[in-house]
Image (cartoon, grey):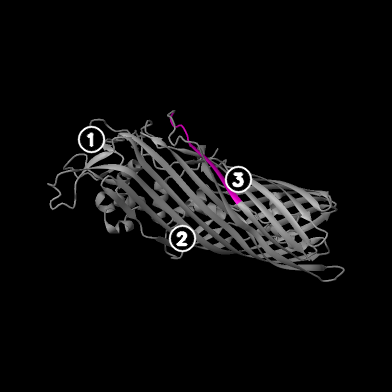
Amino acid sequence: MKKTVLTISALALALSMSAQSMSDGLMFSRNNYVGTARSMAMGNAVTALGGDLGAVTINPAGSAVAPYSQVTISPGLDISIRTTQGTPLNGQHPYFQKKMRNTNTAFAIPNIGFSLNWDTYASRGLKSFTVGFLMNQTQSCSDRTFASGRNSTTSFMGSLAENAYLDGFNGGTLGQDKSWDLAPWDYVAAMHAGLIAPWDPQPGAKADKFIGATEQPGKGNIKYIDGELDQYFGRERHGVKNDYTFNFGMNFNDRIYVGLNLNINSLRYNSMEYMREVAGEGNFGFEYTDNNAPDPSTAPKKWAEFHEGKMTSTYDADGIGFSTRLGVIWNAWKGLRVGAAIQTPTWNKIDERWTTDAITSFSTGTMKGESPLGKNSYRFREPMRASLGLAYVFGSQALVSVDYEVTPYQQMRFTSYDAFSDEFTYTNQDIKDFTGVGHQLRIGTEVKVIPSVALRAGYNFSTSGEYTIGDGERRMPVKAYVHEVGFGIGYSSKGSFFMDLAAKGTFHPDEYIMPYRNYVYEKDVETGEYLKDPEGFLILDPDFLAPEIRNIRNNWKVVLTLGFRF
């Protein structure tokens, strides 16, 4: 089982400097073909089949197999189903205890296009050729995830406070108007909004420490939560990758079919994450100094109570790229067909934008921290990919097809527009160290129950292409597999009209989300100083671990293809 761990602090840190990472590269690079209802129902095992406009994206030679011209449009629905609940840590009762099921439905058009077939009337050699233009969806993301529960042990704001100090920042750095250029945006937004505040546990020592709005000061530099917090985590993500393809195909002797695609690849992705904490039963009041008083050092202390606080991070990316794909299909023997296709790397230009904002409500009023709009542009190279397919056609009654596709994700690369920039040095090194070859196996079948009606089914198995370092420093593939099942029905009239309906379920590995970083380390109860292990590292307190949320992720797509042959 793979654990994919996200933290809002880590996300905001990445966004404050721009948001590229190895995970971003994998998200941009992975393909999960949709296309037409026919190809989707068969698990997109169409490398050796052709004849369908959904197959053309996978094997350009597919357009030349059909002895007719055709036009299709395929509207559909993308349904996201998420089930979340906190997981027990160290034998403790899990936080984010509520089991929540979240469903989101989005409309899409994963296919639209046409292909024109010309007969050369030659008895041998080039018997026909096709020219077409189409759009097929190669990836989509629709995700709405929420989790909630009650916590009396740790807090998001406590994590921000402690980690800001451990990362070497102080109140003077985070409190300035220009702090957005000096520090991670989650810390700056938290400081400006009052989620955290400078705290000197030993008056006069001028210690650069912080305390969260949810925390109470104890002895030394030990802080604690004196009550119960209602915690809420939310995330929405939407994205799509489309191939806009100019296709050219040739039919030689009804035996060998060759095709070429010139692709304009587009991607669009946006996400929003938030973490919210609300005071429940307990003591969430504190004294503070009025810094607007004529002499703050002698001004009497004031009293306030924390009500709730929230931090939100947003990210948007748009990209456009170019690639080519070459394919061939060979009628090898009777009903046996062999297909192969290879696609060049895709060279993308990506523009991205991000923000990090926070707001806190106290009994005395509301404080806000709103970041500027961050922007960045860069180049990203997706890896090449190649597929091989075998199919057997049983006359006009049935067929079975098997595909294998390979993608060397280690070819991914981020490049700055500034040739002398080292902006992506560490990201590209991560790609080299922690990615490898991704594999995809696709199986599909079609049976004609009557001449005008066909039943279809398919299965798809994909590996992640991610690697980790195992025993003996060996690179080991991460066992995070995606399983897909598809099924559908097709109708062809005696005229030119045809219609296909299909559904596909995608079952992802479970995701484990940490909404904030661990921050409670063992300390000396008298001095409050951190304790360290023999190697000099801080020791996590096992009784105060940050919560972890298990997210079960399933997606369903339903597509209806309407088409005409002529």
State the residue at coordinates (61%, 53%): 31
Task: Say above or below: 340 vs 98.
Answer: below
Q: Give the distance between the C-alpha atoms of the residues marked 3 and 1, in whole angstroms.
A: 50 Å
State the residue at coordinates (57%, 47%): 80
Q: Give the distance between the C-alpha atoms of the residues marked 2 and 3, in whole angstroms.
A: 28 Å
| Amino acid type of the residue tagged 3 in the rendering | Thr
Task: Say above or below: 225 vs 381.
Answer: above
The x and y percentages for residue 410 are 55, 52
Say which label, 2 or 3, has the lower sequence index.
2
Crowding at dot 1, Cα within 10 Å, few <14 / some 14-19 / many 20+, comes out as some
Q: Is residue 143 rendered to the left or right of residue 291?
A: right
Q: Is residue 149 rendered to the left or right of residue 197?
A: right
The x and y percentages for residue 481 are 60, 42
Read off the magenta span.
78-90
Locate the C terminus and report the quarter of the image it occupies.
bottom right
State the residue at coordinates (44%, 32%): 94
Say which label, 1 or 2, has the lower sequence index.
1
**Residue 220, which numbered label?**
1
Q: Nearer the viewer, mark 2 or mark 3?
A: 2
Q: Give the distance between the C-alpha atoms of the residues marked 1 and 2, in whole angstroms.
A: 44 Å
The residue that label 3 is drawn on is: 463
The x and y percentages for residue 156 are 37, 42
Q: Is residue 296 rendered to the left or right of residue 429?
A: left
| Amino acid type of the residue tagged 1 in the rendering | Gly
The x and y percentages for residue 461 are 65, 45
